[in-house]
């Protein structure tokens, strides 16, 4: 779509004056060029401003269009690929290395602030090598994480927690070329969580989720347990879960669920764990969204909410106010590769909805 036509359509939809055009046009062009055009789920040939025109046009009244436009300009948070890559690149230095330094300091019985002495020690090198890094999903960008940290070898990194017996054996074999024993520290990495429910939740009275599956595989009594191949059950094990982006609520929910699970395990005294995020999404962000009463009233109306998104997966979270997103997280957040369902549905309704999303989402789950 030519720029001139795009501008004419936008001016017509918004009924802007010349002064408003001169103010809004450069702002939209900057947002599109710097970030929004890189959204990966736009239809072929579509870019941000084209999507914005289609999105705004579905609101019937001029005042509704203005409310919707104002929300996008003032409250939308778009996380670009460059920003995610930056978070991945600093994960080792900001979160992983301090943990390894503290563990080494404890072994050496010295202050953790003697950093140079610690990182030059053979104990530190062994602790680093005996750390296992696992991507919980493809969003973990474990390949980028590995390439950004020369201290980590390929033989201690795996893109998922489904590891074959052969691969587990090879990893231990490579480890034993340098150090006798097995892995003593596990880092679970992933990109984003807003509710924590996809990682650890109660479902029909039973725990479920990605991290729960990992823990089950770790603690079951199967002789062929893959993690028993990788980990010495008689040695203390440190598990650290690190997200690149997360809300406080999600971190707390996962920590609480993890603690409850460990209380049921016979060897819980040999396990320590921590949960953290590189960038924490503060609660005031969703609180601010909820405070935008004109916009909330708009998106909660039957005209602009498609109840078909409330499927069995959506109902695993709070859904009395489904227009606030999965588990009512009320986030104005878009990730460059896809829109999280914890964000406001008006932002991500898929193409087949009665209401079009500004950044249409590709769903991973389908109802049976």
Image (cartoon, rainbow, N blue to C red):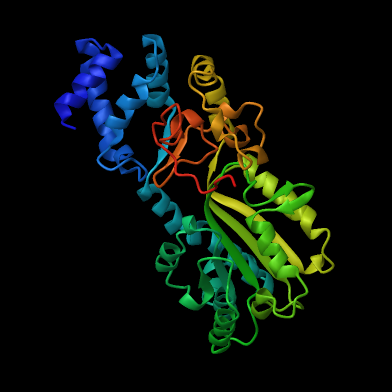
Q: Is residue 78 above or below residue 346?
A: below
Q: Is residue 194 above or below residue 265?
A: above
Question: Looking at the picture, how far across and down is residue 330, in whole percent?
Answer: 56, 30
> Is residue 361 among what the camera can see?
yes
Question: Looking at the picture, how far across and down is residue 349, in whole percent?
Answer: 46, 33
Q: Residue furthest bottom?
A: 177
Q: Nearer the viewer, residue 134 or 314?
A: 314
Q: Nearer the viewer, residue 70 or 46?
A: 46
Q: Quadrant of the N terminus?
A: top left
Residue at coordinates 60% horizontally, 63% vertically from top-left?
99
Question: Looking at the picture, how far across and down is residue 252, in whole percent?
Answer: 68, 45
Question: Looking at the picture, how far across and down is residue 25, in whole percent?
Answer: 23, 23
Count of numbered marks: 0
Please tell me in which quadrant of the rendered image residue 28 appears. Answer: top left
Residue at coordinates 50% horizontally, 78% vertically from top-left?
155
> Is residue 31 among what the camera can see?
no
Taking the image as shown, residue 289 lies to the left or right of residue 16, namely: right
Q: Is residue 39 above or below residue 102?
A: above
Q: Is residue 196 above or below residue 172?
A: above
Residue at coordinates 73% horizontally, 54% vertically from top-left?
258
Please tell me in which quadrant of the rendered image residue 334 appears. Answer: top left
Q: Nearer the viewer, residue 321 or 113?
A: 321
Taking the image as shown, residue 181 lies to the left or right of residue 236, namely: left
């Amino acid at each position: 779509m030519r720029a001139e036509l795009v501008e004419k359509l936008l001016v017509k939809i918004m009924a802007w004056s010349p002064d408003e055009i001169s103010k809004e046009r450069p702002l939209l062009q900057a947002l599109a060029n710097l970030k929004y055009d890189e959204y990966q789920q736009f239809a072929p040939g579509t870019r941000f401003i084209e999507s914005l025109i289609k999105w705004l046009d579905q609101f019937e009244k001029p005042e509704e269009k203005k409310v919707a436009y104002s929300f996008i300009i003032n409250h939308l948070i778009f996380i670009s690929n460059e920003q995610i890559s930056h978070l991945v690149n600093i994960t080792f230095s900001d979160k992983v290395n301090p943990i390894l330094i503290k563990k080494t300091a404890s072994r050496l019985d010295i202050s953790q602030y003697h950093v140079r002495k610690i990182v030059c020690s053979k104990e530190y090198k062994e602790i680093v090598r005996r750390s296992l890094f696992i991507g919980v999903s493809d969003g973990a960008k474990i390949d980028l994480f590995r390439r950004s940290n020369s201290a980590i070898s390929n033989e201690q990194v795996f893109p998922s927690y489904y590891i074959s017996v052969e691969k587990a054996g090879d990893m231990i074999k490579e480890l034993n070329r340098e150090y006798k024993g097995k892995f003593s520290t596990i880092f679970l990495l992933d990109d984003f969580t807003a509710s924590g429910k996809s990682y650890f939740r109660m479902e029909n009275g039973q725990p479920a989720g990605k991290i729960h599956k990992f823990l089950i595989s770790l603690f079951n009594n199967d002789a062929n347990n893959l993690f028993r191949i990788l980990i010495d059950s008689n040695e203390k094990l440190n598990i650290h879960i690190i997200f690149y982006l997360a809300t406080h609520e999600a971190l707390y929910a996962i920590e609480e669920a993890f603690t409850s699970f460990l209380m049921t395990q016979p060897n819980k005294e040999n396990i320590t764990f921590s949960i953290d995020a590189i960038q924490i999404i503060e609660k005031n962000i969703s609180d601010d969204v909820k405070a935008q009463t004109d916009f909330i009233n708009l998106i909660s109306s039957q005209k602009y909410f498609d109840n078909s998104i409330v499927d069995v997966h959506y109902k695993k979270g709070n859904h009395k106010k489904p227009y606030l997103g999965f588990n009512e997280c009320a986030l104005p957040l878009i990730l460059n590769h896809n829109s999280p369902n914890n964000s406001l549905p008006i932002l991500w309704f898929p193409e087949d909805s009665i209401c079009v999303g500004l950044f249409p989402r590709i769903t991973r789950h389908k109802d049976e």
